[in-house]
Amino acid sequence: MGYIVMTFEEFIEGLDRIIEEAKKIVRLLTHSPVYAPWFRGLWEADGDVYDFYPLAREISWKVCGRDLSLMQWEKAWQYRTVLANELKVAREEFANAVVGWY
């Protein structure tokens, strides 16, 4: 296993970027006339990893500017509780999964 060498400043900048991306995703899932009902519908239907993937991939492109492979999403899904009982928590879990924070 390799290590990524970076300065403390680079680490903090990367962490700040991930936090901002996650916040943007939560805002979309809360306020967007497209993404909010899409997420809520999947959540209410107890969607699975594959139901949520098209939404996760689209939001990853829109907010993060990068593709999200199905393999990455399946791994993220294992470590995040996107179907949390509370909608607010579910949105946060989804955002963390999309940005790769798991």
Image (cartoon, helix red, strand yellow):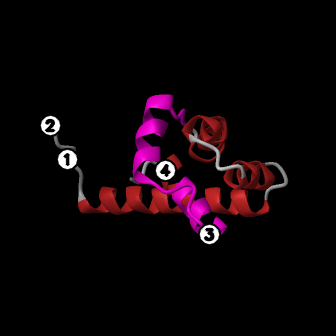
N-term-proximal mark, 2 vs 4: 2
Question: Of the residues under marks 4 and 3, which one precedes in the sequence?
Answer: 3
Residue at 85%, 54% in the rendered image: 33
Task: Residue type at mark 2: give it.
Answer: Met
Circles 1 and 3: CB atoms closer than 8 Å: no
Task: Categorize mark 4 by other alpha carbons within 10 Å: few (<14), some (14-19), many (20+).
Answer: many
Looking at the rendering, the stretch of residues picked out in magenta corresponds to 66-95
What label sits on residue 86 in the rendered view? Answer: 3
Chain-order first, disc 2 or disc 3: 2
In the picture, measured across the screen, residue 100 lies left or right of residue 47, that is: left
CA separation, marks 1 and 4?
24 Å
Q: Quadrant of the N terminus?
A: top left
In the rendered structure, are the residues bearing label 2 and label 3 in contact, judged by CB atoms less than 8 Å apart? Answer: no
Q: Position of residue 3 (x, y in %)?
A: 17, 43
> Badge 3 local density, few (<14 within 10 Å), some, or many (20+)?
few
Report the residue marked by disc 4.
Answer: 97
Q: Is residue 28 above or below residue 85?
A: above
